[in-house]
Image (cartoon, rainbow, N blue to C red):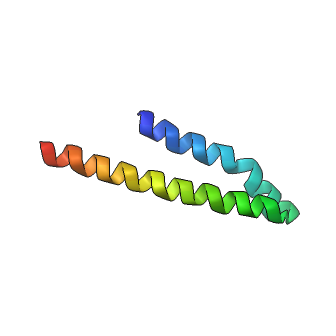
């Protein structure tokens, strides 16, 4: 569940920037959202590889 907590923490940390970007049109917040989403993508890929490795071991 540690990995799930990492995903949840990352998404929750972006909540304020999402609000600032979409509700207040804050461009800097949009940059932070894009950066955070890239981190989320990378984390998701790491998790996918890890799950596949565990699955293949048996």
Q: Give residue 13's quadrant in the image.
A: top right
The image shows residue 20, relative to residue 51, as above or below, that is below
Task: Please say if 27 is above or below 3.
Answer: below
In-front residue for pair 19/42: 42
Which image quarter holds the C terminus?
top left
Left or right position of 33 against 56: right
| Residue shown at 64% from the left, 44% from the top | 12
Going by the image, does 9 lie left or right of 22? Answer: left
Q: Would you identify the image quadrant in which residue 21 lies? A: bottom right
Q: Residue at x 43, y 39 (%)?
A: 3
Q: Is residue 43 shown left or right of residue 23?
A: left
Name the residue furthest top. 2
Q: Quadrant of the N terminus?
A: top left
Residue at the farthest left position: 58
Residue 20 location (% of width, % of height):
82, 56
At 49% from the left and 58% from the top, the residue drawn is 41
Image x and y of residue 34, in percent: 65, 63
* Tally of numbered discs: 0
Residue at 56% across / 60% down in the picture?
Answer: 38
């Amino acid at each position: 569940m540690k990995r799930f907590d990492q995903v949840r923490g990352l998404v929750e940390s972006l909540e304020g920037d999402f609000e600032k970007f979409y509700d207040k049109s804050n461009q800097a917040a949009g940059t932070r959202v894009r950066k955070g989403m890239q981190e989320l993508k990378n984390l998701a890929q790491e998790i996918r590889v890890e799950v596949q490795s565990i699955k293949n071991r048996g």
